[in-house]
Image: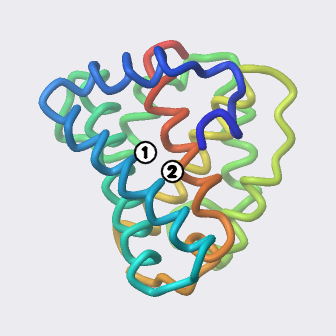
Amino acid sequence: MVQAVNPNITLADVEQASTNLSRNEYAFWSYVYIAGTHEEANQIFENDFSDLQVFSAIRNLSALLEVRLKTLTGNQHQTFFPAITSLYSTRTWWASFETERRQVGATQNSVIPVDNQLRDAINIVSIDAESNFWKSLLVAYITRNYTIHQMDITSPLIQLHSSVVLGHVINVMILADRY
């Protein structure tokens, strides 16, 4: 899933990302396994149980990503957006991230439906490794916000984009400390 988003990622990168999670390493592998198993099951026969499992895995991986980002900042009291602002606001790509975040409507009290936000973020064309990272970060941000507050397995997040979303979330987990 992550190689569909970033072909440069290797198994060693995924293993290092899981090691970086220390006590949460087992949880990471479990969520990845559950997601992969139920993505495959849904391809064989669509079913609500697998949709629920994929949704749960996405939500839990998003939560693990937030924990990872807060660990990198050294401030466990931050939420997702303050953590990424703390980590990345001085990077040269941050202005592009912010412009696209606002354009897709991934802002507080946005009237743009999350399905449209997610679709538009996924459709951003990456021109280099940095833009691919911040695109993944944007998808992960939208996904985290949606899955923490909603429980709708009929949304396009699950029905159309779950594999891609999982790839983006895992991509950020792997590359968070490199960018």
Q: Please give the name of the residue rendered at 38% of the width and 21% of the height, measured from the top-left corner.
A: 15
The alpha-carbon separation of the residues under discs 1 and 2 comes to: 8 Å
Frontmost of labels 1 and 2 is 2
The residue carrying mark 1 is: 81
Residue 143 vertical placement versus 135 (above, below): below
- Residue 53 falls in image quadrant: bottom left
Give the quadrant of residue 52.
bottom left
Cβ–Cβ under 8 Å for marks 1 and 2: yes
Could you tell whether 38 is left or right of 129 in the image?
left
Amino acid carrying mark 1 in the image: Phe
Identify the residue at the far front of this view: 44
Q: Which residue is nearer to you in this view: 35 or 80?
A: 35
Badge 2 local density, few (<14 within 10 Å), some, or many (20+)?
A: many
Q: Position of residue 152 (x, y in %)?
A: 46, 84
Where residue 165 appears, x then y in whole percent? 58, 54
- Residue 54, image x and y in percent? 43, 66
Residue at 74% in and 43% down: 99
Which residue is located at x 25 percent, y 27 percent? Answer: 21
Circle 2 residue: 141
The kind of residue tagged 2 is Tyr
Task: Please identify the quadrant where the C terminus is shown.
Answer: top right
Q: Secondary structure at mark 2?
A: helix
Q: Horizontal placement of 148 versus 154: left or right?
A: left
